[in-house]
Amino acid sequence: KDFEDLQSLIKKSWNASEKRNAIFHNPRGHEIDGDPVIMTDDYDWIKIPTLEELKMISEEIHNVTKEINEARLDPDGFIRKAIEKREALTELCTLNSEL
């Protein structure tokens, strides 16, 4: 289950990051009639995102960040548990090498 949860977080993070990068890093322009546009990765020109769409992307980024932090900081979070297991294993290996 932890592996699937991690994969899900990675996918959500990737998708949110791709949306954000498309907004901030793709070329912009104006149609002849003056409407602002942005170029997609397929080299199509589309209208720039609305304020509502930007808020949705912002919320998506916020939510995935919250999920990551909960998994990392909550005592029962799967990332925290994995880190604790890794630290215990490292300590055990260190003790064994000293014998």
Image (tube, rainbow, N blue to C red):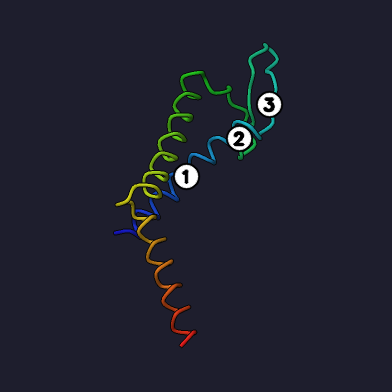
Point out the tag, 1 or 2, that comes first from the N-terminus: 1
Label 3: few (<14), some (14–19) or many (≥20) C-alpha neighbours in 10 Å = some
Q: Nearer the viewer, residue 12 or 22?
A: 12
At mark 3, the secondary structure is: strand
Q: CA distance from mark 1 to mark 3?
A: 24 Å
Query: Which amino acid lies under the numbered mark 2 shown in the image of this protein?
Result: Thr
Mark 3 lies on residue: 28
- Residue 82 position within the rendered picture, expressed as x and y whole percent measured from the top left: 38, 61
Query: Which amino acid lies under the numbered mark 1 shown in the image of this protein?
Result: Ser
Mark 2 lies on residue: 40
Q: Is residue 9 left or right of residue 26?
A: left
* Front of the two marks 1 and 2: 1
Q: Are marks 1 and 3 in contact (CB under 8 Å)?
A: no
Q: CA distance from mark 3 to mark 2?
A: 10 Å
Point out the tag, 3 or 2, that comes first from the N-terminus: 3
| Residue positioned 62% across, 28% down in the render | 45
Question: Could you say which quadrant of the image residue 64 lies in?
Answer: top left
Seen from this angle, which residue lies furthest bottom? 99
At mark 1, the secondary structure is: helix
- Residue 58 position within the rendered picture, expressed as x and y whole percent measured from the top left: 48, 29
Mark 1 lies on residue: 13
At mark 2, the secondary structure is: loop
Label 1: few (<14), some (14–19) or many (≥20) C-alpha neighbours in 10 Å = some
| Residue positioned 68% across, 26% down in the render | 28
Point out the tag, 1 or 3, that comes first from the N-terminus: 1
